[in-house]
Each structure stands twice: as structure tokens, then as C-alpha cells.
Amino acid sequence: MFRGKKINLFVCRFWLVAILFSINIDDAHGWGPQGHRVIGYIADFNLTPDTKKNIVEEFNINNLADVAIWADKIRRKRKQEKPWHYTNIKEDEWTYVMQRDCPNGNCVIEKIKDFSRVLGNNEIPFQKRKEALKYLVHFVGDVHQPLHLGNQKDRGGGKIRLSYLGKNVSLHYLWDGGLIDWKNESFSKYAARLNNRLVDSEKSEWLNSPINDWADESRSLALKYAYPLEDMELSKKYLVRGREILDQRMVQAGVRLANLLNKLFQP
């Protein structure tokens, strides 16, 4: 009798493990932790000395990369916040329209605007402003991931399955950073290498664009480059172009995040 219970317990555990491994962990909305930390480092490189000093002294955050994945961690407890990380759009639409795509304001674009207002208001309690800063570090990254402006019907590529490096993964996973060859570099070194490629003309152009344009850029990249697959196969050309796009989007996110914070912390 006791032996039978042990066998049943083993079987239950086996199926529990099997179920857990079958869950599409890679379908979670958000850059992988690598991408978010790289964006945090790039943003930190581009803060003004005054902004950097304010963030360290007021919020005890030494580097933006340190809080880059906080919003993903807290989402596990605050289930209602999941939609804040993305905006899925109907397949035939190329641009973001709030009234159509985010009427309740619970999407990544509108949350960037909301938390910018919170952080910029010194009359709001300290803890709420600190959380707003951590949300901004994460959400500015999210809106630059092309499939965070993906199609509604496939959940931003989460339902599209592909074989990559011998694993069955989602299209969303690939664009969350799965495509990137990290070359065993530290996040800070990878970020520094990307940041060093910056040219002033590019940076100036990126900084002049409003938040809705960031979303439209991602939407355009999703439709032009992420979704077009030949017979659901990943060609070498597709992989190379995808990596180039993700590198650029991480730099753009970091530079724009720094610019947003520099403006909010202006005296």
C-alpha cells in the first residue's frame, strides 16, 4: 500500500514536471533579461551628470540596469499589469491609435506617458515615484521590441512556433532577444560596444521623435521583418537582419530612455 502511494506520488511529480516544461515560458511579454539590462546600461551611459546624481541620491539606484527587469518580476504578483508590457494591434493596421488599440489606457505606450507624469511630479509620494522610474526603465525597452506591437490574433508572435538551434520556440521569443548572439560578453560590455557605434546625427534624429512614433517604428519592423517567414523557416538572411534590428532597437531604447529621464530631472 505504501509502495503504491510512492509510485503514484512519483507519477504525479513526473507529469507536473512535464507540464511545467511544456508551458511556453519563452512566450512571456518582454525583452529577455539580457536585452533589458543592456538597454539600462546604454541609458545610464547617456544620462547627464545631474540626472545620474539625482537618481543615485534620491532613489538609491546606482545603475539603471539594476532595476531593468523589476517590472517583469513584480508582474508575477500583480497579474493585472501584464497588458502594460505590450500593445497588440489588428493585422491590417500599421500604426498605433489609442482609441482603437488601447481605449482603457492599459498598454505599454500609455503607461510610459502615465509613469512619466508620476515621476515628474515631486508632490507624489516617494515610493510611487521610485516605482514609476523602474517601470519606465522597463517599458521604454518593451515598446522598442517589434513584436510588442505585434498582431492580436497570434499574441505578438507568441502562438507562432519555430525550430531554432534545435529548440521549439515562439517567434516572440526570438525577437525578445533569442536571436542575439551574446558572444559570452557581459551585459555592460555588450552595451558599451553598441553605445560606441552611436553617431550624433542618428542620436539627434531619435531624440526628436514622440513616444507614439517609437510604437509605430516597432509596428513597422514587426510587419516588414519579423512576420515575413518563408514556409516558417528561418533563413540566414532573416537571422542576420533580425540581429541588426534588435541591436539598433536596444540602442534607440537606451538613448531615448536617458533623454526622457534627463528632461524629467531637469531643475
Image: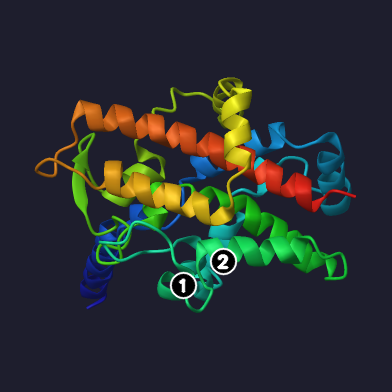
Determine which residue is flagged by label 1. Answer: 102
Closer to the chain start, of discs 2 and 1, is: 1
Label 1 secondary element: loop
User: Which amino acid type is shown beneath numbered disc 1?
Assistant: Cys
Residue type at mark 2? Glu
Which residue occupies the foreground of this view, 107 or 177? 107
Alpha-carbon neighbours of circle 2 within 10 Å: few (<14), some, or many (≥20)?
A: some
Who's the residue at 55% across and 71% down the image?
Answer: 77
Q: Could you give the CA–CA distance between mark 2 and mark 1, rounded to whole angstroms?
A: 8 Å
Using the image, determine if residue 95 lies above or below residue 240: below
Residue 143 seen by the camera: no
Residue 100 position within the rendered picture, expressed as x and y whole percent measured from the top left: 41, 73
The one of 254 and 82 positioned closer to us in this rendering: 254
The image quadrant where one finds the N terminus is bottom left
| 80 lies above or below 107 | below
Residue at 57%, 51% in the rendered image? 140
**Residue 137, label in figure:** none
Where does residue 192 sit, x and y in percent of width and height?
Answer: 61, 24
User: SS for tag 2?
Assistant: helix
Q: Dividing the picture into quarters, in which one does residue 70 lie?
A: bottom right
The residue carrying mark 2 is 110
